[in-house]
Image (spheres, rainbow, N blue to C red):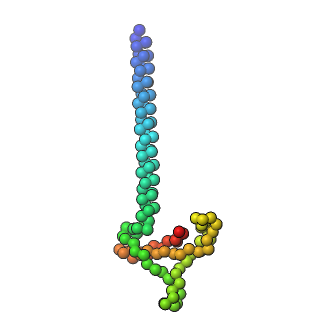
Amino acid sequence: MSYRDEQQALLLEVKILERENQRLREALEASEDRFKSALREEFEARRKNVRMSCVMCQGNLLPVAIVAGHDVRNPLPLKMSTLRFGSPDGGFTASAPVRSYACTSCGYIHNFIDMG
């Protein structure tokens, strides 16, 4: 009779361990989902604030004008070729203006191509 009791005890132990394993798998999946959503939110926050703070020192950015040409009264705004970049409307654009921001703390100049 002891053999049957030991076997039943082991089967009961296996069932308990299987339930615990299933609970842990569900908890792991839930934590992975929370981690992925936190990463997505952090990425979106960084993407939205890319023009708000300096990447070098986290200082504030102010818009500045960078122009070309020798005529001070008629400066030429800088443009960059965007033939490699697709237009949001479809097709390609020839050039897009360069937007620049200067950091108020360290003076680093951030240049962006204004695709919009």
Q: Is residue 21 above or below residue 87?
A: above
Residue 26: quadrant of the picture: top left
Q: Is residue 6 above or below residue 68?
A: above
| Relative image position of residue 21 (x, y in whole percent) | 43, 32
Question: Residue at coordinates 40% horizontally, 13% vertically from top-left?
Answer: 5
Q: Is residue 14 above or below residue 1?
A: below
Is 74 placed left or right of 93 in the picture? left
Q: Is residue 3 above or below residue 34?
A: above
| Relative image position of residue 104 (x, y in whole percent) | 36, 75
Question: Residue at coordinates 53% horizontally, 75% vertically from top-left?
Answer: 97
Residue placed furthest toward the right: 91
For the residue pair 101 and 15, the one nearer the viewer reads as 101
Residue placed furthest toward the front: 89
Is 75 placed left or right of 60 in the picture? right
Question: Residue at coordinates 41% horizontally, 23% vertically from top-left?
Answer: 13
Q: How many marks?
A: 0
Residue 58: quadrant of the picture: bottom left
| Relative image position of residue 47 (x, y in whole percent) | 45, 61
| Relative image position of residue 113 (x, y in whole percent) | 52, 71
Residue 57: quadrant of the picture: bottom left
Locate the N terminus by quadrant. top left
For the residue pair 8 and 19, the one nearer the viewer reads as 19
Question: Residue at coordinates 39% horizontally, 76% vertically from top-left?
Answer: 107
Residue placed furthest toward the top: 1
